[in-house]
Image: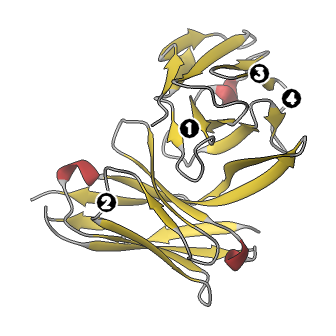
Amino acid sequence: DIQMTQSPSSLSASVGDRVTITCRASQSISSYLNWYQQKPGKAPKLLIYAASSLQSGVPSRFSGSGSGTDFTLTISSLQPEDFATYYCQQSYSTPVFTFGPGTKVDIK
Amino acid sequence: QVQLVESGGGVVQPGGSLRLSCAASGFTFSSYGMHWVRQAPGKGLEWVAFIRYDGSNKYYADSVKGRFTISRDNSKNTLYLQMNSLRAEDTAVYYCAKDIIVVVQRSYYYYMDVWGKGTTVTVSS
């Protein structure tokens, strides 16, 4: 089974900061990596698919990169509505998907 | 608009059963695979099960294999999750999600593009 890890598990940042979250797969998954945002009490929302493709309607301050085993999600200028938990998800072994443990972004 | 609405959650004793439903609208339900994903209190997301658009193939997480059954009724635009032999560790919010396939540079990529709001299952005596 493919295992996913994320770092950091949490971070504190200020509005306007550049934020980077890392996701690592236990084996190569090419570009089969998605990113989701989840706010408290809400369902997850897709941000990025295929490692770097921005989902329609998602602000351009979000970007994804990487391939193989190492991936990053970057928020170029953190906005108040971006405080949330972010999950990576591998789809290499589709339809058996695996999520990372999440990274919580909160206000400094 | 595209919408998924889960129902059927509740409180059940260990060893009991529950059936969750997910009503779909705003898209051609019979053309898409569907997932169940759960989230235990204060924990991360866990993929639970997937069913192909026509119900021909089903896949399960090891944690629920043999206890949960995913099914669908395309005539009713509804997805189901039959949960038997429930355990305390099955306590979670259960989400249904629509599967989507896109082609990027001639490769097929998969993700969950629409999610319901979830239904809460509590397993407790």
Same chain for labels 2 and 4? Say yes or no.
no
Residue flagged by tag 4: what amino acid is it?
Ser
SS for dot 1:
loop
Tell me which chain the residue with mark 2 is part of: B
Same chain for labels 1 and 3? Say yes or no.
yes
| Image quadrant where residue A82 sits | top right
Q: Are marks 1 and 2 in contact (CB under 8 Å)?
A: no
Q: Would you name the residue on which mark 3 appears?
A: A65
Q: Work out how far the residue at label 3 is from the one at label 2, CA to CA, in angstroms.
A: 36 Å
Q: Work out how far the residue at label 4 is from the one at label 1, CA to CA, in angstroms.
A: 19 Å
Specify which label sits upstream in the sequence, 4 or 1: 1
Residue found at x 71% / y 30%: A30
SS for dot 2:
strand
Q: Are marks 2 and 4 in contact (CB under 8 Å)?
A: no
Q: Would you name the residue on which mark 1 appears?
A: A39
Q: Are marks 1 and 3 in contact (CB under 8 Å)?
A: no
Q: Residues within 10 Å of mark 2 (few under 14, many from 20)?
A: many
Residue flagged by tag 1: what amino acid is it?
Lys
B114, A2: nearer the viewer: A2
Q: Residues within 10 Å of mark 1 (few under 14, many from 20)?
A: some
Q: Would you name the residue on which mark 4 appears?
A: A60
Of circles 4 and 1, the one toward us is: 4
| Image quadrant where residue B46 sits | top left
Residue found at x 34% / y 44%: B40
Percent of width and height locating residue A68: 68, 23
Q: Work out how far the residue at label 2 is from the one at label 4, CA to CA, in angstroms.
A: 36 Å
SS for dot 3:
strand
Q: Is residue B123 above or below residue A99?
A: below
Q: Is residue B64 above or below residue B12?
A: above
Percent of width and height locating residue B112: 65, 52
- Single out the residue that lies furthest toward the left: B125
Q: How many marks can you see?
A: 4
